[in-house]
Amino acid sequence: MNEFKKLLSLEEEKIDWKIVLFLILVSYTFNILVRYIYISIIGDNPQFLWQHHLMINNNDGYYWAEGARDIIAGFHQKNDLSPVGTIPSILTADLAKILSFVSFDQLIEFLPGFFGALVVVPVFMIGRLLGSTWLGFLASLMSGMVWSYYHRTMFGYYDTDMLVITLPTFAIWLMMLSLKNKDFKLFLLAPLVEIFMIQWHGGLFNVANGIFIMSFLYVALFDREKEAILFLVFLVVPILPISLPYKIVSLVLLYLLFVALKRKIGYIKPLHILLAILGVYIVAIGFPWIKSTLLSGYITRDVTSDESGLHFFSVVNTVREAGHISYDTLVHRISGSWLGVIFGVIGYALLLIRYPLLMISLPMVALGFFAVRGGLRFTIFAVPFMALGDAYIAYLFAKIFKKVFSDDRVASFSKYFISLLIMVAFIYPNYKHIYRYIVPSVFTKSEVAVLNQLKKIASRDDYVLSWWDYGYPIRYYADVKTLIDGGKHTGDVNFPVSFALTRDLRASRNMAILDVYQTEYDYNHDINSSNYLKEMMKRYGVKDPNDFLTMLSTDIKLPKIKEDIYYFLPLRLFNIFPTVAMFSTIDLKTGKEIKHAFMQLRAVSKKGQTITLNNGIKVALDKGVLEAGKRIIPISKIAIVGYDKKGVLHKRVQRLRDDGLDVIYLESYGKWIIVDDFYYNSAFIQLFVFENTGGFFKPVILNPYIKVFKVVK
């Protein structure tokens, strides 16, 4: 047993702090440089640049950018949902003022990479704390550029993810440092980092809570010294249900109290303190957390209903990063390869056996592997510690191999060389992936140009109606209000917008005006309606939701609104249009989905008057039917729409019969759209494809890729 323990033990190196700082700088620089691969490749495509700078490549980033922009400007509009009071936006705005020589667009382009790569520091220091600076260096090289972590901290991925792993990893290192040294002077550091990380991203409360539980178990099982137990008191404060100022004051008072009573600690019984801490935790934190997070927070349903009995489609089911993932995806996103994750798990487990103090990090690792159930976004949590596990395996292998050499200097050199070589093997699949992973910006330059044009037409109080995927960038570039966005997109708020995009032109216009009216009414009267649809029904004295929705296609009296409403309709909306429709093609009384036909296809071959599409369906133009295997489906209408060389839209529509499906050939895009009458008559297709306004809309900006219409009030 002693031999096994000796084998697993890290050999402490006597390394000067100057060398330590140099190694950290090397690791940090390496993780920054790999991020420039993306810049060097995508920078050649002008469609991803705006004002000569790379545009944000994730939707949520525009939310924080909007807040920072408005903080710098010193104002924002009422009810525009700008996050001017959030830590990410405040920090970005402060940095923009400090780094005044850097443009704002350039700052938000590079900030994710420079902040994200900081994870190498706590990983390095954890390795050093366990006993080996070299172990920390090896792990830090890999920790900042593994698949999933790179994805969320690459240049252009401006989001809270740029610090969402770095902050808790710093907290874990500082906790380990405090518990190992038992120095009161350190006791404030980890709790302060935890307070900041919870302010940075509310979801990190769950991480802080898990870290506290494991810290409590570690102290109870392995370290019952009074200083370690007293440190737990400090760790309770960040997760208490009290406001930020009270947390700070509580920590300071605790620190002053313990310093004053330091000489009298000997009179305190450890068991009493542990029981008191456990009692406070269970009552104030544990039960509420279990109820709100474990019992409801991670249980998702396809359909949700409110107290009025109306059923709405749950947005969780349409978010890719929240869906289940395969084990292969999990493995590659956590370590880059199967070997990486296998050795990472083994190495991490061996580190836990030899150094139980590391068990404080278990919640991060568990959350990373929870991604199989919870979705892609969780994989990043395990990355730093799987890198530490891989580094430990490389270290142990080199430690064993060096015994081959009799010369001490050669043996010592071989340990460093061989372990680094093994680590390179773990790193290489991730490095290779970075070269292949070229993600486009959220919007192209052409799309942003339209929003920039719209900014000059619309006022800041006006609304732009589009799907929630585009909400944040629309607000950022056009400086207008939106009805839904990446944070405001529950089933009940999505329903009116989905309805407006998928129903006939009159119903669409009516719903848009009612939605804007209710949104402004709630804000101006400082209320929060359970759902807008219920309030709309109440306004017209209609109790049956289906009767109300039918009524919207008629000439009803609409409330007066001072705001103008614009529809932002990009070509890319075709890619998600069936998903958009799911939120309103639902029986509100039963929750049952009402299905309609929509297919977006491309031609793969043509023989005579028969076109074969990429899903195997054949369009027989001469017969006026669709051939799907042995099934013959009649075509009701055939529409051919396209632009000539002068950019003029031409459309030819031929009605063949009253029943069947409709075929739309978008000649300029090479798209074949097969739909039923429901989709054919939808506001999106009528406005975007045919530019039919029905007198309910006015064209504002028309080009082949984006069309903007103004609602006629």
Image (cartoon, rainbow, N blue to C red):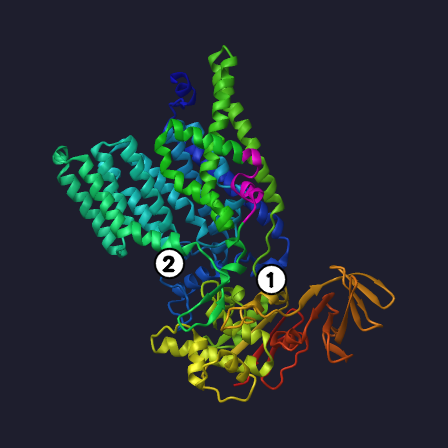
Q: Can residue 389 be seen in this view?
A: yes
Q: Would residue 418 appear left or right of 101 to someone viewing this image?
A: right
* Residue 348 quadrant: top left
Element type at mark 1: loop
Q: Which amino acid does label 1 sit on?
A: Thr
Residue 610 got which mark?
none
Q: Would residue 403 appear left or right of 608 to someone viewing this image?
A: left
* Image location of residue 212, percent across then percent down: 31, 43
Between 479 and 589, the one nearer to me in the picture:
589
* Residue 685 quadrant: bottom right
CA gap between label 2 and label 1 equals 27 Å
Identify the residue shown where x is 37% and y is 67%.
Answer: 74
> In this rendering, is residue 410 above or below 232?
above
* Image location of residue 301, percent across then percent down: 48, 60
Identify residue for label 1. Answer: 444
Q: Is residue 202 visible?
A: no
* Residue 22 quadrant: top left
Element type at mark 2: helix
> Can you say which quadrant of the picture contains the N terminus?
top left
Q: Would residue 84 appear left or right of 709 to someone viewing this image?
A: left
Identify the residue shown where x is 58% and y is 65%.
Answer: 579
> In this rendering, is residue 203 above or below 146?
below
Q: Categorize mark 2 by other alpha carbons within 10 Å: few (<14), some (14-19), many (20+).
A: many
What residue span does the magenta drawing correspond to? 325-340
Between 583 and 177, the one nearer to me in the picture:
583
* Image location of residue 67, percent across then percent down: 42, 63
Residue 90 got which mark?
2
Which residue reaches farthest top?
Answer: 406
Query: Magenta stretch: residue 278 in it?
Result: no
